Image (cartoon, rainbow, N blue to C red):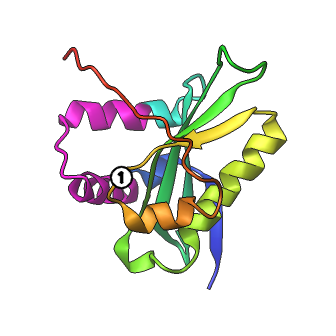
Amino acid sequence: MTLEIRDARPEDELAWRQLWDGYLTFYKVTLDPAVTDSTWKRILDPASAVAMRVAEKDGELAGFAIHLIHPSTWVMHNDCYLEDLYLDSKFRGQGIGRALLDDLVALSKKNGWERLYWHTDEGNATARKLYDTYVKSDGHVRYRMKFR
C-alpha cells in the first residue's frame, strides 16, 4: 500500500468533485455549482493564492487539503491558511489526515511561510483530536459577515 501526498493535477477533477460533495454533505452545506467550478479553476491556476495537496492511496484519491498563502500585518512573511481538509470516510483512521497536515507543515518550513493556521467546527471532535496533537486552540472566536 502506497500513500503519496502531491499537488492536485487536472486529471484529479472527477475524484476531487466526489470528495468535495462528501465534504459539503458532512458540513450540511449546499453551494452553487459555479462556486465549485471556480474553486477548481483556482486550485489549478498557478497565479492563484488557492492551492491543493491531495492524498493518493493505491491510486485512489483519499483526501485533500485546500490552502491559501497570504501576507499578514502581524508577521514579515506569508501565512498558510488551511481552509479545507477532508478524507473519504473509508480512508479515515489510517494516518492520512496527519500525513496531509505534516505535508503542509513541511511546505510551510520549506517555503518560509511564517505560520500555518486553520479552524474547524467546535463539534468536530474527530478533527479536533488530531489538531490538538499539533497545537492547542488559540482561543480566537470567528465572526463572519455575508454580503451575497
Left or right, 117 with respect to 25, comes to: right
Q: Residue at x 45, y 76 (%)?
A: 92
43 shown above or below 121: above
Quarter occupied by the N terminus: bottom right
Q: Residue furthest front?
A: 139
**Residue at 65% from the left image edge and 67% from the top image edge:** 4
Q: Residues within 10 Å of mark 1 (few under 14, many from 20)?
A: few
Please name the residue that numbered disc 1 is placed on.
Answer: 122
Residue 23 image point, x, y percent: 31, 55
Range of magenta residues: 14-41
Residue 30: name its quadrant: top left
Where does residue 28 sit, x and y in percent of width and height?
18, 52
- Residue 55 visible in rendering: no
Tell me the quarter of the image containing the C terminus: top left
Can residue 71 be seen?
yes
Kindly state the secondary structure of the residue where label 1 is placed: loop
Q: Choose between 48 and 100: the one closer to the eye.
A: 100
Please name the predominant secondary structure of the magenta segment in the image.
helix
Q: Is residue 53 left or right of residue 36?
A: right
Check the image and report above or below for 148 versus 10: above
Res. 55 image quadrant: bottom right
Residue 81 lies, with reference to residue 107, above or below; the image says above
Residue 85 at what x, y percent from top left? 46, 53
Seen from the viewer's position, the closer of residues 108 and 14 is: 108
Q: Residue at x 56, y 26 (%)?
A: 49
Picture residue at 52% right of the left edge, 43% below the top: 118
Identified by mark 1, the residue type is Glu
Q: Position of residue 117 (x, y in %)?
A: 59, 40
